[in-house]
Structure formats: structure tokens, C-alpha cells
Amino acid sequence: MLRINKWWLVWLAFTLLLSAYYTNALVGSEKNKFLPGKATDGHYQIEDKCDTCHGDGFDDKETLQKSCVRCHGDELKKVNDSHPKSKFTNPRNADRIAILDARYCVTCHVEHKTEKTLPMGVTMPEDYCYLCHQDVAKNRPSHKGMGFETCDDAGCHNYHDNKALYEEFLVKHNGEPENLQTMMLPEKNLKTVFHQKNEKYKQVLTPKDMNNPESVTVSPKISYQWHSTAHAKSGVNCSSCHNEKEHWIFKPNQKVCAECHEKETDGFLASRHGMRTGEGLPAMKVGEARLSLRGTAANKVLNCQSCHTDHSFNTEKAAVDACLGCHEDDHSKAYKKSKHYRAMLEAKSTKTNKQGVTCANCHMPRLTIRENGVDRTLVDHNQNNTLRPNEKMARTVCMKCHGLKFSLESLADTNLINNNFEGSPSLENKGFAMVMEREELKRKGLIKDDKK
Amino acid sequence: MKTRRNIISLSALSLALIAGGIVGCSKESAAPAGGITPQKMSDALHAVMVADRTVYTKKVVNRLVKDEKVIKATEQWKDDKSLPLPAQMFRFGSELVADSDANFSYSLLSLWPINKQNEPKTEAEKTGLQYIFDNPGKNYYTEEALGGTNYFTAVYPDVAVAPVCVSCHNEHKDTPKDDFKIGDVMGGVVIRIPI
């Protein structure tokens, strides 16, 4: 009779159990057990779906690159990326890419390396500018002695987005006052665009026009909320959102919103709030966030209605109260004591054309997009576009009301950010003096002598 | 777009022919049976590039900026709502080709570049740019190895064809040379084809 050592049986059972556990994790929803390290702040939301970035294989650099471009490519194009891949594919740069292969995002931005990830949420080599710009002081004497680790100091240069930092822009906006004479955000104009698109959106509906089926009872509160909105004033009836292929749906999702608010929904699905939904994962819950948010909001699911509460869809509440319902960091907590908020209260009470500034005005700014000669001003729901590095906010947001120098200096001041801009910036942006000095030399015809 | 289409169509045709027979080439490499030499392909590509570049410079930029004075051409053309500079137009085409699988590359370099990233770097570029400056009307052909790949490299003179070329370069804050005249070689177009 075959005798089997009992320890072999224990080993076999243990192995089978372990295999079953990891197989279950691999095919189920706990793939994060296999993560080689924590994903960065911008990616942890989707870390359960490895193939979002890795595709079918794990060693293919091209697949990773395509994944980066799929989510971030448009954003880089929009900001006129100063260092696109096409700058490095020319064979004349072969020596450079042998040292730092700038054709691939992952050369600088490595994932799952918590120990190397910087506060901005990505990894970055320290002095990457040196390789191509080591002799910068020859043509820019003002840069002599500056360390290459300081190139991307706040308000100086960015590798990708220099929309508010290039020399001519600084010259053009030099000398602007802290507060511009006209301090106005662009007006949203979805209603006008829709009215131009189709006459049916000009129809103003009242509660007697509601077309909910008899089987669905609408409370007076909902009826009141709906008919007070732009929806009722633009011919958007109950069935417009609740009917899907003749069936009544009680909780329409973002696909329904996207039928009219496509760009806004796209922004949301690309944002930290909506990227899980965008990747086909269950919607993010507040309690799953890495940021320290309000415990009372932990079970809140992030979708369009989390901020735009149905059926009132109050955008004023969505722009402040919705944010402060979850965020309770120093900057958020200081908002209601800030000049921006006080200006909003004043604007409301005086009913002048003055404007205040909401959380959303800065973090989900209004963008004007020109398509076929028509300007559409909408809210960019992807807060990543202006979050980090925060100079990205200067042009899109701050400069609607403030001078460029004041904007850049304020954005570079951590204390000011924490107290929600109560006070004056403590740092001076020296870039303005540098560019104006060059302007003066050029005016005197001395600039070439300076370079010799 | 037209430039890009022309370039890509021509390169695709030429590359198909090259793939059909070329196994190597020299400065004066012989045409393989049924194919064309890298030099011929490069010359053809350059003919399209220089034609489109001249048309844009003369018939768009110089006409609207210098003659009609209805619009400006500036480096920050998007912000300024102006025309892209001819050199930018050329580079944008080059970057689109770089993003495709066209299997050749081109760049605009100069011994007096406004952007210092466009000064000659490789030995072939240094020798070639000096050669076309010293020998007006002539092109420079060679082969070079870069990043483990061998290339047929051609350098063609880039000549100031309109007043707007010289005024813009002579007046630019970052120009190392401010006495260009029409007809001068201001730089060179470098075309590389892997062999």
C-alpha cells in the first residue's frame, strides 16, 4: 500500500489554497494584490484594471506609450506641448535618446515607484534639461550659474505646458496690475448654442407639460425643481432624460447627460472624479479616495448627480457646496473666508455685474472653444487640466481677473495657496526682469554684443 | 496637408521601390534593377519640400505680410492670430512625418540658427552645412551611422527667397547674423533615409 507522508498532503493543500486565492484575485476584482508598488495619485483610481495601461502584455513599451497618449495625448496637444515625441524621433537626436529616451512618457514618469514619486504625483529625473540645454547661459547670460534642477521652479519653465511662460507672453503682460480693470469670467452659453442649433430648445415648459407616464408619480418638489431649471426653459421634458428605448429609467446615468453635455461629460470621465467610470469600473466612492476627505461623505458615489443634484441641477451649489461637502483640506476650509468668496457674496447682494469666484471657477474653469466659427463657453470638468503644475491655471483662470506676474507669484506661494490667497505673494518672479532686460538690450541694438 | 500628402505618397512609392531591390548605397550609389537610389529619392523629396516652402513663403506670407500688409506672420501665431512663419510651417510638416511611419526624416538646420537646437550636431551636418555655404548651388551627400542605423544623408541649401525671410531673421532677438540678403544660403535642409 502506497504510504504518503502527511506533510506532503499539507504542502499540496496549502499550494492549492494559495493558487486558488491568487487565481481568484487575478480574474476577480482584486488585481491590486499583484501591484509591484502603489500607483500614483493620478492612477490609483484605475489600478484594478491593469490592461488600461498595460494592454495584454507587460513588457511592451509601445503599448504603454499608446495608453499614455490615449488619455493624455489631447491634453498635451491643446497646450502646444513644448517637447512632443516628434522632436526626438529624428535620428540626429539618437545620442540624446540613448541617455534619456524622451520619445516615451515612462522614461521620466515611472509608475508604481512610490519612493520616487514627487508631490506633484509623478516621478521625474532631477536635471533632465541639462542634456539638451547645457549651454543655455551662452545665449541667456541671465541664466548663468542657475542649477538645472531649478529650471522647472514655479513660474519659470515647464517641460510640456509653457502657454503662460514663454518670453513674448511675459513681455506682453509685463506691468499688468494685480487686479485687472475688467475682472470677468466668460459667460457660459450652452443655452444660446442649443437655441441656435434647434428651435425645439426654445420651448419653455411648465409643470402641466410634464410627460411622465401615469405609472410614475412626480412629487411637487421634483416638479418645482425641474420647472425652475434651464432644462424646463429649454424644452427638456421628463422623457428627454428618463426614457430609454420607450422604457422609463429612474436613475439616468452619465450617458444620458452626455446627449446634451457631451464635452462636459467627457471631461468628467477623464477627471479624478470620473475616471473609474470612464474605464468601465464601478464609480468611485468618496471613501476610496486617497485624499483625506470628509468621513460623512465616505459612501457618496461620484457621478454627475453627486454634484449636480437632481432635479434642481443647481450649478451654484455644484460649484461650491458640492466641493466643500467632501474636501476639507486647509485650502478648501479657508475658502469661505477668502476674498474670492467675499466677492461672490458682494456680487450677489449688490446684483451688479461684479463676479465672485467659486471653487469650480478655478478648478473646473470655463473654457471658450471655437468650432466652425462659433464660440462655445463651457465648464472643463477635468480638473487635471489646471491642477499640477499649477502655473497651468495662470492663463486659463487667474488672468481673467489678475495680472500675469501677480498670478504666477501667487501660484508659487504655498502659504497663499493654503490660506486661499489671503495676503500678498511673498516671492518675486524674476523671469519678468530677465525678459525686459533683453527687450531693452534689443532696443539699444546691444543684444548680439551681449551674446559674444 | 497637401505637403504632407505629397511627401508621404512620394516616399511610400519610393520606399516600395527601395524595398524591392536596394541593398546598400554609397555617395554615388548605383540604382538597383527596377529601383531608384536613395539620392534620387531624397532629391525628389526635397523638390516637393522646397516647392511647397517657396509657395508658402512667396504667395502666402510675403504677399499678405509685406505686400498687402493685411496680417502678420509671427512665432506665436496661435496667440497672435497670425500666420505661422515659413520655417515653422516647414517644421510642422517635418513633425507630422516624424509621427508617421514614413521611414525618412528631414530637418531645417543652420550655421546661424535662431533656435540653438537647430545648429549642426553630427559630423555630416557640420560638414554638409559648411559645404553648401562654400559651394553655392551644390548639394552635399554622404552616409552616416546614428544610433546603430546607417543613413543616406543629404544636405540641400535653404535660400532666402523673399524679403520676409531676410527681414525676419535679421531682426530677430536671437539671430546670430543680421546681414542676410535675398539669395543668401541661410541654412540647409537635411534629409535622412535609413539604408
Image: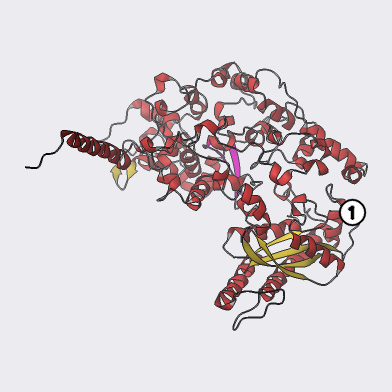
Q: Chain of mark 1?
A: B
Q: Quadrant of residue A32?
A: top left
Point out residue B181 in the picture as x, y percentages from the top left corner.
90, 62
Q: Amino acid at mark 1?
A: Asp
Read off the residue under disc 1: B178
Judge whether A417 appears above or below B32 on screen.
above
Q: Position of residue A432 (x, y in %)?
A: 79, 33
Q: Which residues are magenta?
A: A366-382
Extreme-left residue of the structure:
A1
SS class of the residue under badge 1?
loop
Q: Residue at x 72, y 64 (%)?
A: B190
Q: Nearer the viewer, residue A22 or A14?
A: A14
- Asked whether A200 or A418 is in front, the reply is A418
Q: Residue A128 in the image: state x and y as whole percent.
A: 66, 41
Q: Quadrant of residue A7?
A: top left
- Closer to the camera in the image, A277 or A318: A277
Is residue A237 located in the magenta-colored stretch of the structure?
no
Residue B174: image location, x then y, percent: 83, 48
Instruction: Determine the residue positioned at 59% across, 33% down.
Output: A388
Quarter the C terminus of chain A occupies:
top right
Residue sitting at x 63%, y 34%: A393
Residue B1 seen anywhere in this rendered image of the structure: no
B147 sits left or right of A165 in the view:
left
Residue at the limit of the structure toward the top, as seen here: A337
Residue A214 higher or lower than B129, as above or below: above
Going by the image, does B44 lie left or right of A287?
right
Q: Quadrant of the N terminus of chain A?
A: top left
Label 1 Cα neighbours within 10 Å, binned few <14 / some 14-19 / many ≥20? some
Q: Is residue A284 visible?
A: yes
Decide which of A347, A144 is in the foreground and name it.
A144
